[in-house]
Image: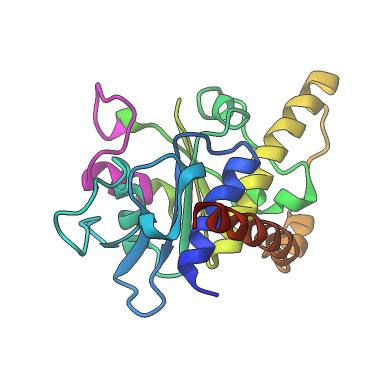
Amino acid sequence: MSIIEDLVIASRVCVEHGVIDAYGHVSVRSETNPQRYFMSRAIAPELITESDIMEFDLDSVPVVPNGPPGYNERFIHGEIYKARPDVNSIVHNHSHSVIPFSCTTCQLKPIFHMAAFIGLGVPNWDIADAQKGTDLLVRNNVLGKSLAEKLGKHPAVLMRGHGSVVVGEKIQTAVGRTVYLDHNAKMQFQAMMMAGQDVMYMADDEVMANVAWQEYYRSWDLWKKKWQKKLAEEKSLNS
């Protein structure tokens, strides 16, 4: 199966789990040219098909000129791919459960073993540190580079008042982390409502024991097979 199909499925999965709605986007690095990546044209992720996928260079310029417009915040992806050769997929999302952690002093911590990667650190980026008076959108490479620098070597970064960016060596890792980051935020909030600050989070050795195996293969296999069937049905209806 192609990474283009995987990219379409990844977008649908993120919509299904409520971490992306009409906004947000998923990308994947080219398997043949690491200086290129694929992402959809500017369209609601739930509507993406393979024909909507565009190829970009790492300055986030479309490889084929005069095509449809890309997402305004594609610069997030290009600058992270520049800075992180280990990253092959990126999800930018607006999870409603995660955003409160981006604009308060409450730190996101791993409470759920499926989100153990949070224990590797999830820094918080404030766009105002890079440019004052923006609409909080990463509309150019300068802002994208600032965000990539804050991400550093971490698996995810929060964006103050906006959302988060999650990365992975594989597309299933980036998508799995995105889904379980959202779940962890919900669970942490619930636990804090029950016990205040008296919450037992995962210990560092527990974090590392889980991160060692967590690439979300089983979740991805389930999601992919389900969406392959649904996409085949869509094609049949539209043919």
| In front of the other: 87 or 111 | 87
Q: Please report the residue visible at 68 percent of the width from the left and 61 percent of the height from the top.
A: 220
Give residue 18's position: percent from left, percent from top.
62, 36
Q: Please report the residue visible at 27 percent of the width from the left and 35 percent of the height from the top.
A: 130
Magenta stretch bounds: 129-148
| In front of the other: 37 or 132 | 37
| In front of the other: 24 or 188 | 24
Give residue 235's position: percent from left, percent from top.
53, 57
Whether 49 is drawn above or below 107: the answer is below
Q: Please report the residue visible at 31 percent of the width from the left and 32 percent of the height from the top.
A: 129
Q: How many marks?
A: 0
Give residue 167's position: percent from left, percent from top.
51, 56
Image quadrant occupied by the N terminus = bottom right
Colouring style: rainbow
Give residue 20's position: percent from left, percent from top.
53, 38
Left-right relation of 82 to 102: left
| In front of the other: 55 or 136 | 55
Is 139 part of what is drawn in magenta? yes
User: Is residue 133 in view from this perspective?
Assistant: yes
User: Is residue 197 in view from this perspective?
Assistant: no
Is 210 part of what is drawn in magenta? no
Whether 140 is drawn above or below 174: the answer is above
Q: Please report the residue visible at 33 percent of the width from the left and 49 percent of the height from the top.
A: 41
Please identify the quarter of the rendering in which residue 207 is found: bottom right
Please identify the quarter of the rendering in which residue 56 is found: bottom left
The residue positioned farthest toward the bottom in the image shown? 32
